[in-house]
Image (cartoon, rainbow, N blue to C red):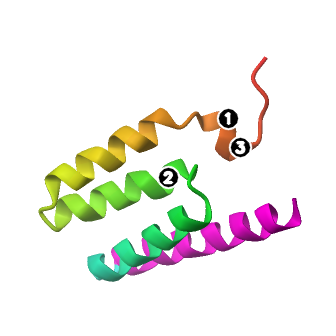
């Protein structure tokens, strides 16, 4: 359980770094950070979304589409640790 918490915290860190460098225009570096966030937490919906945006900017449209599909297939409840009723 502790390992999952550590991975989630690291995933959030890499996600935020990706957003930060992406906003500064370094889309390739942002993509690396989003990939690392997804590697640490494969259910990180926002990381898939931002990865898709980065891929779109880089002209990698099919990969971007695939990331959107994956991201949309992940239920929000997983990221929020909220149980469905």
- Residue pointed to by mark 1: 77
Q: Identify the residue at the far right of this view.
A: 2
Query: Dot 2: within a 10 Å radius of its alpha carbon, few (fewer than 14), some, or many (20 or more) residues?
Result: many
For image coordinates 24% across by 62% down, the residue present is: 55
Q: Is residue 10 magenta?
A: yes
Query: Mark 2 and mark 3: span between their CA atoms?
Result: 12 Å
Sooner in the amino-acid sequence: mark 2 or mark 1: 2
- Examine the structure image and report whether residue 9 is included in the region drawn in magenta: yes
Q: Of the two numbered discs 2 and 3 on the same chain, state the one appearing first in sequence.
A: 2
How far apart in space, not on screen, are marks 1 and 3 (Cα)?
5 Å
Residue 75 position by quadrant: top right
Question: 7 or 76, which is in the foreground?
Answer: 7
Considering the whole magenta stretch, tell me its main secondary structure: helix
Check if mark 1's residue and mark 3's residue have beta carbons within 8 Å: yes
Q: Is residue 66 above or below residue 20?
A: above
Identify the residue under disc 2: 46
Q: Secondary structure at mark 2?
A: helix
Magenta region: 1-23
Measured Cα–Cα span from mark 2 to mark 1 = 13 Å
Q: Which mark is residue 80?
A: 3
In this rendering, the answer to whether 75 lies above or below 12 is above
Q: Position of residue 6 (x, y in %)?
A: 78, 71
């Amino acid at each position: 359980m502790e390992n999952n918490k550590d991975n989630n915290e690291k995933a959030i860190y890499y996600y935020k770094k990706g957003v930060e460098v992406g906003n500064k225009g370094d889309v390739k570096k942002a993509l690396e950070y989003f990939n690392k966030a997804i590697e640490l937490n494969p259910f990180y919906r926002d990381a898939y979304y931002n990865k898709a945006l980065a891929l779109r900017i880089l002209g990698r449209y099919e990969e971007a589409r695939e990331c959107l599909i994956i991201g949309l297939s992940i239920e929000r409840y997983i990221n929020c640790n909220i149980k469905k009723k």
